[in-house]
Image (cartoon, rainbow, N blue to C red):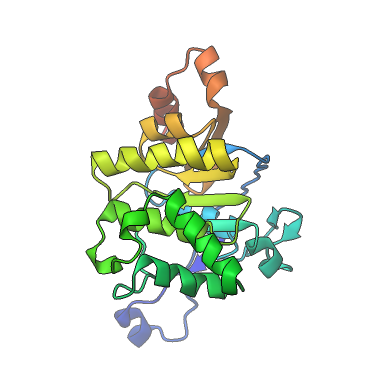
Amino acid sequence: MQFPVAKRYRELLLHPFRRRRVVTALNSVNLEVEKGDRIALLGPNGAGKTTLLKLIGGLLLPTQGEIVVNGHDTLRHNSAARKSVGFVMNEERSFFWRLNARQNLEFFAALDNLSGTVMQERIRELIHFVGLDSHADKTVDTYSSGMKQRLALARGLIAEPEVLILDEPTRALDPVACEDLNDLIVDRLHKGARKTLLIATHRLEEAMRLCDKVLIINDGKIRAFNRLSDLTAQGVNLSDHYRSNVTPKQS
């Protein structure tokens, strides 16, 4: 996956016709995700985690190769592929702050072609599922970070996706809110709904609690992809395993 780098003002003046530089965000990535997998994506900032998740979610299109989600190529059949995927960003900014939770979900449900009693029932289910029953009629600008993240999770589940992508879901949360959201993911989302989960995180303890596999990315390449149970059986500490795959080798 490659991105053109925007020219600086000086470059535009001095070299207006020079081609823009291109940065490779992901290179030679080959990955197969099985139904029901819970995969933690680990790696330094800028390693390519979010780019990979956006490619799987159909928010970005690959410049080379192909991505197939639930039998649909994200490039040729993007709409069909995206129907299988829900995406929850780490800093949700797309909500309408002066509307309440119910009204926000109604808007996004309409974008997913839901309407009438089907839409209203789905919204009631989701508000209860994420524990926002007592706050459903309060405007989103009064919500704490943890409540906003719960609402973002509800929005990601509107279309009942088989795959749920969470990009650093607890990054902006305090320890209590972080624990509450993790409880929701473990006890209700996975055990209850059996979703395939792809979770980008910097918290190793979170990866161990929420996931059964870890994918380590660095410099746009997959450095390791393991079952946590296999690492444990081999006596490998996840912190050491992570460090060994992201620390530059000494020559």
Give the position of the C terminus as an image quadrant. top left
Looking at the image, which is closer to me, 127 or 150?
A: 127
Would residue 69 be found to the left or right of residue 181 on screen?
right
Would residue 126 be found to the left or right of residue 12 on screen?
right
Q: Position of residue 92 (x, y in %)?
A: 36, 62
Q: Position of residue 162 (x, y in %)?
A: 63, 50
Identity of the residue drawn at 55% across and 65% down: 59
Q: Is residue 24 at least partly visible in the picture? A: no
Looking at the image, which is closer to me, 16 or 248?
A: 248
Q: Position of residue 30 (x, y in %)?
A: 65, 45
Q: How many marks?
A: 0
Q: Quadrant of residue 76?
A: bottom right
Identity of the residue drawn at 65% across and 42% down: 33
In the orientation shown, which residue stands out farthest toward the right? Answer: 71
Identity of the residue drawn at 67% across and 67% down: 78
Q: Position of residue 207 (x, y in %)?
A: 43, 34
Give the position of the N terminus as an image quadrant. bottom right
Q: Is residue 185 at least partly visible in the picture? A: yes
Identity of the residue drawn at 56% across and 68% down: 119
Would residue 155 be found to the left or right of residue 67 on screen?
left
In the orientation shown, which residue stands out farthest toward the front? Answer: 117
